[in-house]
Amino acid sequence: MNMENDLTHTKGTTMKNIITIIAITAAVSVASLAAETKTDPNRVKITNFNFTPRALTIHTGTKVTWVNEDDVPHTVTSPEKKFKSRALDTDEAFTYTFSTPGTYTYFCSVHPHMTGKIIVQ
Ligand SMILES: [Cu+2]
């Protein structure tokens, strides 16, 4: 009788520990997912002489951040002169807030074959 009680008690404790571990794991996954979503959406990476994503769709009033991850300077230049960054060195960023709907093309003035597009809705 006594032994049976002990066994039940041990089982209960183990189960509780497992549930606690699952709960902690779930919380950590949610946290890392939130961090990813937070850093990403309105960011354009400049890597390997490309703007990534090449076309980005955003809502009116959104601030877009370009980050140069290449080891050569690039610019973010609007052909209609709506916005123009200076030459961005490695890890430097340029931001612009799009307050009017429309399609905005841009290119790198150092490497004009590098082009991208922001679609503001
Ligand atoms: Cu460039």
Image (cartoon, rainbow, N blue to C red):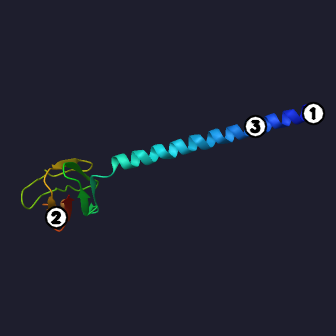
Choose the circle earlier in sequence order: 2 or 3: 3
Callout 3: 10 Å neighbours few (<14), some, many (20+)? few
Horizontally, residue 103 falls left or right of residue 47, namely: left
Horizontally, residue 37 falls left or right of residue 107, namely: right
What amino acid does circle 3 point to? Gly
Residue located farthest toward the left when viewing the structure as drawn: 80
Between the C-alphas of marks 1 and 3, the distance is 17 Å
Residue located farthest toward the bottom when viewing the structure as drawn: 113
Question: Along the line of sight, which residue is nearer the eye, 116 or 89?
Answer: 116
Q: Which residue is mark 2?
A: 111
Callout 1: 10 Å neighbours few (<14), some, many (20+)? few
Q: Quadrant of the N terminus?
A: top right
Q: Which residue is mark 1?
A: 1
What amino acid does circle 1 point to? Met
Choose the circle earlier in sequence order: 1 or 3: 1
Beta carbon at label 2 within 8 Å of ligand 1: yes
Question: Along the line of sight, which residue is nearer the eye, 81 or 1?
Answer: 1
Quarter of the rendered structure image containing ligand 1: bottom left
* Circle 1/circle 2 CB separation < 8 Å: no
Residue at (14%, 66%) from the top-left corner? 112
Choose the circle earlier in sequence order: 1 or 2: 1
Which of labels 2 and 3 is toward the front?
Answer: 3
What amino acid does circle 2 point to? His
Q: Which residue is mark 3?
A: 12
Residue at (35%, 46%) from the top-left corner? 38
Between the C-alphas of marks 2 and 3, the distance is 66 Å
* Circle 2/circle 3 CB separation < 8 Å: no
Callout 2: 10 Å neighbours few (<14), some, many (20+)? few
Residue located farthest toward the top when viewing the structure as drawn: 2
Q: Secondary structure at mark 2?
A: loop
